[in-house]
Image (cartoon, rainbow, N blue to C red):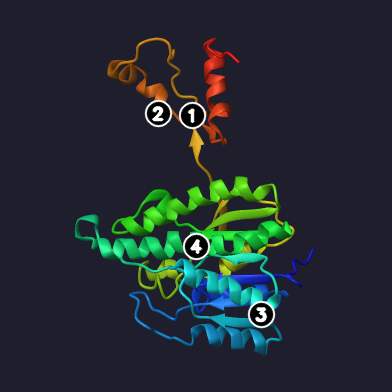
Amino acid sequence: MSLRFDGRVAIVTGAGGGLGRDYALLLAARGAKVVVNDLGVGKADSLADASAAERVVAEIKAAGGEAIASFDSVAEPGSARRIAEAAMDAFGRVDILINNAGILRDKSFIKADLVDVDLVLRVHLNGSIYMTHAVWPHLMAQGYGRVIVTTSIAGICGNFGQIAYSAAKMGLVGMMNTLKIEGGRKGVLINAISPGAVTRMTEGLNPPAIDKYMTSDRVAPVVAYLVSEQSEASGQIIEAMAGGVSRVAFFQNAGAIFDPEAPMTPETIAEGWDRITDLTAATPITHGVEARIEPNLRSIGRWIR
């Protein structure tokens, strides 16, 4: 089975280099028309290469593909809309959105400048919301769409000096969880990639022995599958790094079930703490309050319809 994207239009943000570039090149090589979006900035917002998006477009065209460059920022609603409009103007539709653009401002929390914290949140979290909001009406109206948000092990597990980045990356998981519900009824699927790759944003952060295998071409095929017609996954967090591909999920245990009609004290919690925190028989968290509480109330005879 060959995965193709003929007739599909993809927007890839932060596609002037690294992961985004490989996403754009792979989709274009398999038939997609691509909007290559990039500001051309370096790790600390320096204008490292304003022509980065144009160069990727040139690569795509030289290989026989179709692409246009976009230089708008994802961090403002108006400019995010312009990126979506560029796709509609050039190709008449949007089918795929890969939210990849990002920046870093790493400092320990006690030293963090809140202006930098806000900027990181605006690019990673708000930027993905703005971009997805800009294309969402098109995806829902046509009854088809594939959206990727980029989370991180830093958001899932934490990482020293990355308070804003970590908060944004975990926020994107919440965004995905809700849009999975809203989009699923219309054939619009959304997933999160947690990638590991050395890019202009992350160079120098890992030991060389690790960086040797942290290449973006080990991540791009995973993203390409997730945005393909063949994939029916939605609401998944997929980690891809150094050749390893796995699913990340959140689990909840049975916990301790206390009678909601009986008094509860801090001592009650202390006495039940081992049961509250025991993950021996934990299962994946399910959507909705009722599905999670009903079994508990039934088990102690308190469920009444």
Report the mark closest to the observer, 4 or 1.
4
Secondary element at tag 3:
helix
| 239 over 93 or under it: above or below | above
**Label 2 vs label 3: CA separation?**
54 Å
Identify the image quadrant of the N terminus: bottom right
Residue that carries the numbered disc 4 in the rendered image: 130
Residue that carries the numbered disc 1 in the rendered image: 253
Q: Amino acid under label 3?
A: Ala
Report the mark closest to the observer, 2 or 3.
3
Residue 277 is marked as: 2
Mark 3 and mark 4 residues within 8 Å of each other at the beta carbon: no
Where residue 185 sits: x, y (%)? 69, 47
User: Hey, which quadrant is residue 33 in on the image?
Assistant: bottom right
Residue 90 is marked as: 3
Mark 1 and mark 2 residues within 8 Å of each other at the beta carbon: yes
Report the mark closest to the observer, 2 or 4.
4
Q: Which of marks 2 and 4 is nearer the N terminus?
A: 4
> Which residue is located at x 64 percent, y 81 percent?
67
Q: Image check: 279 left or right of 244? A: left
